[in-house]
C-alpha cells in the first residue's frame, strides 16, 4: 500500500492507497518542533485505528511547502517504515509542462493539484486551494501549467484582524446567516466569509477573461466547501485532490524509484 503526505504550513494531510482506492485519510497539525519519534507515535496511532501496521506500507511519497520539517519527516519514515520516501521536487516526473518563469518556484502542492485536476477533468482548468495561502492555478486545454495567483488565506486575514485591531476578538470562521451583522463577531464573520467569496469570484472572472476560454473551476482545502456554497464560479469541491495527485505522481515514477 502507498502512504501519501501533503505537508502544508498549517496541517499535514495523509492518506493510504491500495492501488487506486483511498482507504483512509487523516489530518494533523504541522509542528516544526516535534521530533521524528513524536510524529512516529501519531502515525502509528492513526494506522492502528485503521487496523493497519507499518509493515503494510510498501511506499511513501511526500509533497511539502515547509522545507524545515522535511529532515524530521524523512527520518521518521525511515525508522517507522524502513523506506526511503519519494519527495516531489525537481527531477520527479509529473507529466505537467510548467510555463512559470522559474518552474522551481512553483509549490509542490500546486503541481500535485494540477496533475490530479487535469487527469480527472481535463482542461482548461482553474484549481483553487484554500490553505494557509489561497492559490489559484491555471491549466490550459493541453495540460500545461500556465501560472496563477497567490493571496493570503482566510485564516491569516482573520488572525491579522485580531492581532492588529485592539478591540476585535479572535472568531470562529463560520458563514453568518445574513450579510448585515448586528454584533462585532457576526460583522467580522460576514466581512471575512462574504468578502472572501467576492475575492474568489473576482479573481476567477479575471482569470477566465485572460485565459479566453471557459474552464472548469475546482476547489480544495479547508474552507473550500464553505466558500463554494455561495460562490458563483466554483463548479465542484474535491477535498482529496492533492492526495490523488500524489498517487498519480508516484505511479509515474514507480519504475525509476
Image (tube, grey):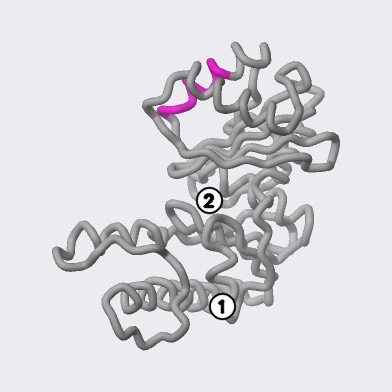
Relative depth, front residue between 73 and 111: 73
In the picture, residue 185 is in which quadrant?
bottom left
In the picture, residue 77 is in which quadrant?
top right
Magenta segment main secondary structure: helix
Q: Residue at x 43, y 52 (%)?
A: 132
Residue linked to disc 1: 231
Relative depth, front residue between 183 and 57: 183
Secondary element under disc 2, as helix, strand or loop, is loop
Residue density around tag 2, few if under 14, some if 14–19, many if 20 or more, within 10 Å: few
Horizontal arrangement in the rendering, residue 257 relative to residue 128 (left or right): right
Q: Which residue is drawn at 45% across and 68% down?
A: 174
Q: Is 108 part of what is drawn in magenta? A: no
Relative depth, front residue between 57 and 176: 176
Magenta highlight range: 68-76
Question: Residue 208: x and y, percent?
Answer: 59, 75
Question: Residue 12: x and y, percent?
Answer: 53, 39
Figure quadrant of the C terminus: top right
Q: Which residue is drawn at 47% across and 58% down?
A: 134
Do the residues bearing badges 1 and 2 touch, measured as CB atoms within 8 Å?
A: no
Question: Residue 138: x and y, percent?
Answer: 60, 61
**Front: mark 1 or 2:** 1
Horizontal arrangement in the rendering, residue 136 relative to residue 95 (left or right): left
Question: Residue 206: x and y, percent?
Answer: 51, 76
**Label 1, label 2: how many angstroms apart (C-alpha)?**
28 Å
Residue linked to disc 2: 100
Secondary element under disc 1, as helix, strand or loop, is loop
Relative depth, front residue between 115 and 185: 185
Q: Which residue is drawn at 44% across and 58% down?
A: 150
Amino acid at each position: 500500500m502507498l502512504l501519501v503526505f501533503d505537508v502544508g504550513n498549517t496541517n499535514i494531510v495523509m492518506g493510504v492507497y491500495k492501488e487506486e482506492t483511498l482507504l483512509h485519510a487523516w489530518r494533523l497539525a504541522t509542528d516544526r518542533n516535534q521530533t521524528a519519534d513524536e510524529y512516529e507515535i501519531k502515525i502509528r496511532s492513526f494506522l492502528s485505528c485503521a487496523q493497519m501496521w507499518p509493515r503494510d506500507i510498501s511506499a511513501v511519497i511526500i509533497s511539502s511547502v515547509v522545507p524545515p520539517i522535511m529532515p524530521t519527516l524523512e527520518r521518521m519514515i525511515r525508522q517507522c517504515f524502513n523506506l526511503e520516501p519519494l519527495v516531489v521536487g525537481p527531477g520527479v516526473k509529473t507529466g505537467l509542462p510548467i510555463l512559470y518563469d522559474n518552474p522551481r518556484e512553483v509549490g509542490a502542492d500546486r503541481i500535485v493539484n494540477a496533475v490530479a485536476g487535469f487527469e480527472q477533468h481535463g482542461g482548461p482548468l482553474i484549481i483553487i486551494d484554500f490553505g494557509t495561502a489561497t492559490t489559484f492555478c491555471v491549466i490550459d486545454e493541453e495540460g500545461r501549467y500556465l501560472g496563477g495567483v497567490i493571496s493570503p488565506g482566510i485564516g491569516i486575514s482573520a488572525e491579522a484582524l485580531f492581532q492588529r485591531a485592539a478591540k476585535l476578538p479572535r472568531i470562529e470562521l463560520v458563514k453568518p446567516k445574513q450579510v448585515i451583522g448586528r454584533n462585532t463577531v457576526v460583522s467580522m464573520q460576514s466581512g471575512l466569509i462574504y468578502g472572501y467569496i467576492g475575492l474568489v469570484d473576482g479573481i476567477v472572472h479575471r482569470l477566465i477573461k485572460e485565459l479566453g476560454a471557459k474552464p472548469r473551476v475546482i476547489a480544495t482545502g479547508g474552507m473550500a466547501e464553505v466558500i463554494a456554497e455561495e460562490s458563483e464560479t466554483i463548479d465542484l469541491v474535491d477535498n482529496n485532490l492533492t492526495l490523488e495527485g500524489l498517487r498519480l505522481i508516484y505511479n509515474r515514477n514507480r519504475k525509476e524509484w
